[in-house]
Image: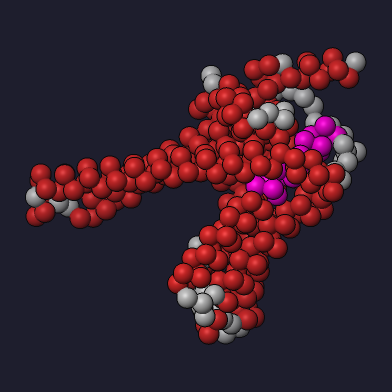
């Protein structure tokens, strides 16, 4: 019963959420096995953080450039494997971990390069928007005079505008990246064709897609926050050295405000690092499944993909 395919029909947001958790629950171990690649990679990164204090500045830069590149590649590969696994689950097939990872290997390079380009463009847009933001604020202060500026109101306005700017940039680029990966992986398109294809699928329903994508990414964030709060409470009950109040511990874990110096490392901090990685590993499949289902939902709405599949089955 757990391997029954999802009904190929347009889904509202409630149906999408139900499908996400149904597929994850039915194929929990395969999804978690694929996502564990992220856990191992990030564990290596954290180890490097504590072991690179003894090297010089030049060596440290070289180590971190190669490390970040490898982690980015591992993350893309894990997401690719999860997308193939989500597709198998969506059509009611059993997930074979080795098989879906083998499927991801030939499509790794265009996914990696395309994701890197999208990320760089998003970063550049955010950087330019931030500069423009600062210039406008400086111009405003110089116009009205420093003495006439209400500091509290200005700080609130700046924070609100900055949050809107970040959400707008993320909301604009996330759907393109998600649909780009889906088309390159599942339709075996080239990198350039995948970018064009993602625009085609988003066109006409941009705001719905953006809102759904943001909600999909906020969902695992909220689940992760709750899990971190629960584990923080359990850590406080243990009375380990270095554990602060509940709010402090939740903040340290949620924002990764943990020590990166070997001399400051305690058992409690090691547990916080492991809990953080475990929570992230647990929640990654949620948003990948959601993005994959949204891709199929867009194809059903725009191209009648469900009719096409029914014809092939018949």
Decide: is 305 above or below 289.
above
Q: Is residue 152 left or right of residue 304?
A: left
Task: Give the image location of residue 151, x and y in percent.
Answer: 20, 55
- Whether residue 134 appears in magenta in the rendering, the answer is no
Q: Nearer the viewer, residue 266 or 241?
A: 266
Task: Give the image location of residue 62, x and y in percent.
Answer: 52, 64
Dominant SS in magenta: helix
The C terminus - image quarter: top right
Report the residue at 59% width, 82% height from top.
Answer: 266
The N terminus - image quarter: top right
Report the residue at 68% width, 28% height from top.
Answer: 189
Residue 198 visible in the current orientation: no
Report the residue at 60% width, 46% height from top.
Answer: 219
Residue 305 visible in the current orientation: yes
Q: Is residue 167 left or right of residue 106?
A: left
Q: Nearer the viewer, residue 25 or 118?
A: 118
Name the colouring of the figure. secondary structure
Magenta extent: 76-92
Task: Give the image location of residue 84, x and y in percent.
Answer: 76, 39
Task: Give the image location of residue 119, x and y in percent.
Answer: 51, 43
What is the count of numbered marks?
0
Q: Is residue 250 left or right of residue 11?
A: left
The picture quadrant where one finds residue 209 is top right
The picture quadrant where one finds residue 140 is top left
């Amino acid at each position: 019963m757990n391997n029954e395919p999802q009904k190929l029909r347009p889904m509202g947001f409630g149906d999408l959420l139900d499908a996400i958790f149904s597929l994850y629950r039915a194929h929990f171990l395969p999804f978690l096995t694929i996502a564990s690649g992220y856990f191992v990679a990030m564990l290596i990164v954290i180890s490097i953080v504590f072991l690179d204090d003894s090297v010089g500045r030049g060596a440290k830069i070289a180590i971190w450039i190669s490390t970040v590149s490898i982690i980015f590649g591992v993350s893309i590969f894990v997401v690719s494997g999860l997308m193939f696994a989500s597709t198998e689950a969506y059509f009611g097939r059993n997930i074979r971990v080795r098989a879906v990872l083998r499927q991801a290997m030939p499509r790794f390079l265009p996914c990696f390069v395309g994701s890197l380009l999208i990320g760089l463009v998003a970063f550049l847009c955010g950087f330019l928007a931030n500069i423009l933001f600062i210039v406008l604020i400086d111009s405003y202060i110089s116009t009205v005079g420093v003495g006439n500026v209400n500091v509290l109101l200005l700080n609130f306005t700046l924070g609100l505008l900055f949050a809107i700017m970040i959400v707008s940039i993320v909301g604009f680029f996330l759907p393109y990246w998600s649909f780009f990966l889906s088309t390159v992986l599942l339709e075996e398109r080239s990198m350039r064709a995948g970018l064009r294809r993602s625009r085609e699928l988003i066109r006409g329903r941009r705001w719905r897609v953006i809102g759904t994508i943001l909600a999909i990414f906020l969902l695992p964030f909220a689940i992760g926050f709750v899990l971190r709060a629960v584990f923080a409470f359990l850590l406080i009950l243990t009375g380990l050295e270095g554990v602060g109040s509940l709010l402090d511990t939740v903040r340290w874990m949620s924002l990764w405000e943990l020590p990166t110096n070997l001399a400051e490392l305690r058992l409690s901090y090691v547990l916080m690092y492991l809990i953080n990685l475990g929570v992230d590993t647990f929640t990654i499949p949620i948003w990948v499944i959601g993005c994959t289902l949204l891709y199929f939902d867009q194809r059903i709405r725009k191209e009648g993909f469900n009719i096409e599949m029914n014809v092939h089955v018949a």
